[in-house]
Structures are given as structure tokens and as C-alpha cells.
Image (tube, helix red, strand yellow):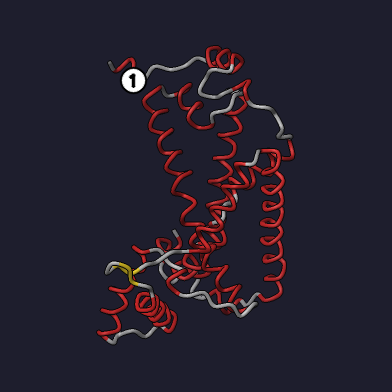
Amino acid sequence: MAGSLFRKKSLDKITADAAAGHSDAHGAGLKKVLGVRDLTYLGIAAVVGAGVFSTIGGAAYDGGPGISLLFVITAITCGFSALCYAEFASRVPVAGSAYTYSYVTFGELIAWIIGWALILEYAIGNIVVAISWSGYFNNLLVHIFNIHLPDWLLVDPLTASNAFTTATNAMAAGNITDPAQLESYRFAINAYNSAPVIGGMHIFFNLPAFMVVALITWITIIGIKESKKTANAMVIFKVAVIIFVIIAGAFFVDTNNWKPFMPNGFTGVL
């Protein structure tokens, strides 16, 4: 029993199955349309995720200037991860990603666990990025185009319900001193009160998040040859934005803001 759970596939077996076109990797059934440049962009996109835009604000709030150390730690960690994937891909030259790599090295049980983890990542992991993008997109509509979407079209039902309960209790207590927190609570209460009610239930729908996920899904479905152009363009744009922020920010450095360097200690940075 234990032997079957941890049985491994040999490199020769996986390569032969891939060449025959009937393995987990699909092998010969896929047309090779990605070149070295495309794979390089794909690697950059995987290492430099959207979290650098969506989570940096909260991280800076807790870590202070010491967040610069977090960037260094993250860069080193991502570098090791990239090197591991490069080594795996060179030793197991078939499609299949971490599932196939773990099947060869650790066995079937670990591969099964990693396979389901990948499914959860691909199915759910993009939700956080989509919700964060929705907030940025709404700010763009409001401040640039003066377009105001209803608040109930900018939040999901569970978040809206929890935020309304928290906001109502906090407002009733009257101990809110942070202006940003106060504005967040007001948004939650207004979104809940302005939402349409059907069958006694308040209706919420994060329209921008849904639209961006639908758009990316459509681009992916039409084919890898078409979607790679969009992916490459987004990687170039993302890296260009990061470089622009670094260069532009260099002219506004104020060393007085570096104290305290880690207001919440190293734990706050992490």
C-alpha cells in the first residue's frame, strides 16, 4: 500500500509517454509556439507577481521603511524558486509543471497533493488579484473619468456583509480615529444600505473583478499564440511601471522618513 502511494515515474517512462501523446503532460499533442523570449517573459510574470502592486500598501503600513528588507528577502526567495524550476524543467523536459516534477522525485501521493494545490491556485488565487484590481480600476474611473459605479457593484456578498457588521459596531462604539478606516466603514455601510434587495437578500456583485477575469479567460481560450502576445505586453508594461516608480521615487527620497526604520520590529516587516 505504502509502496503504491509513493511510487515514482522514471524519466524514461515520462519521456516515452509524452512522445506518444498519452501522458499527463499531453506531450506531442501540443504545438510548440513559445520561443525563448516568450518563456523568459512567462518566467518574469510568474516571479514578479501582481502582489507587488496589490499588497505593498498594507505591507508598508505594518513594516514601515523596513519593508525594503522584505523586497530583498522576497527577491532572494523567488530567485531560488526560479532556479529550482529551471533545474526541474531541464531534467524533466515535458509539460506538466510541479505535478510532473514531484511525480518523478517524490512519488504519486505528493504529486496528487500538489496537483490539487495547483488546481486551487489557478481557480481561486486570481480572486485576490482581481478584487485588488477592481479597487484600482474604480479609483481610475472616479478620479480620471468622473464615473461613479454603485458601491454594491464593487464588493462581493460575503465581504459586504462582514464589513457592514464590523462597520456598524465600530461606528456605534465611536472610537474610530483613523480617517482612512472611517472612510472604509462609511463605504461598507453605504454599499449595504444602497444594495437592491431581492427576496429579502441584499444583492452584491463585484462587476470590475468579474469583467477582468472574464476578459483574461477569453484571451486564454482563443489560443496560446494570441494570448502570449497579450501576456508579453502585460509583462513589459508591469516591469516598465516598476522601473518608472523606482527612478521617479529616487528624486523624492527623504531620509527623515526612515526613522523608525522598523516601527513594529522585524515581525512587522515579515
SS for tag 1?
helix
Q: Quadrant of residue 203?
A: bottom left
Quarter holding the N terminus is top left
Residue that sits furthest to the front in the current view: 199
Query: Picture quarter containing residue 133?
Result: bottom right
In the image shown, does 13 or 152 lie closer to the viewer? Answer: 152
Q: Nearer the viewer, residue 246 or 262?
A: 246
Is 13 drawn above or below residue 195 in the view shown? above
Residue 162 seen in the figure: no
Q: Quadrant of residue 121?
A: top left
Out of 178 and 32, give the one closest to the viewer.
32
Q: Position of residue 142 (x, y in %)?
A: 58, 78
Q: Type of residue at label 1?
A: Leu
> Residue 207: x percent and y percent?
50, 64
Query: Residue shown at 39%/29% (left/top)?
Result: 112
Residue highlighted by disc 1: 5
Q: Residue at coordinates 63% horizontally, 20% vertically from top-left?
A: 28
CA neighbours of label 1 inside 10 A, class few (<14), some (14 to 19), many (20+): few
Closer-to-camera residue (113/224): 224
Relative to 115, is 241 on the left or the right? right
Lateral position of residue 113 relative to residue 47, left or right: left
Q: Residue at 44% across / 48% down in the picture?
A: 124
Q: Residue at x 41, y 69 (%)?
A: 264
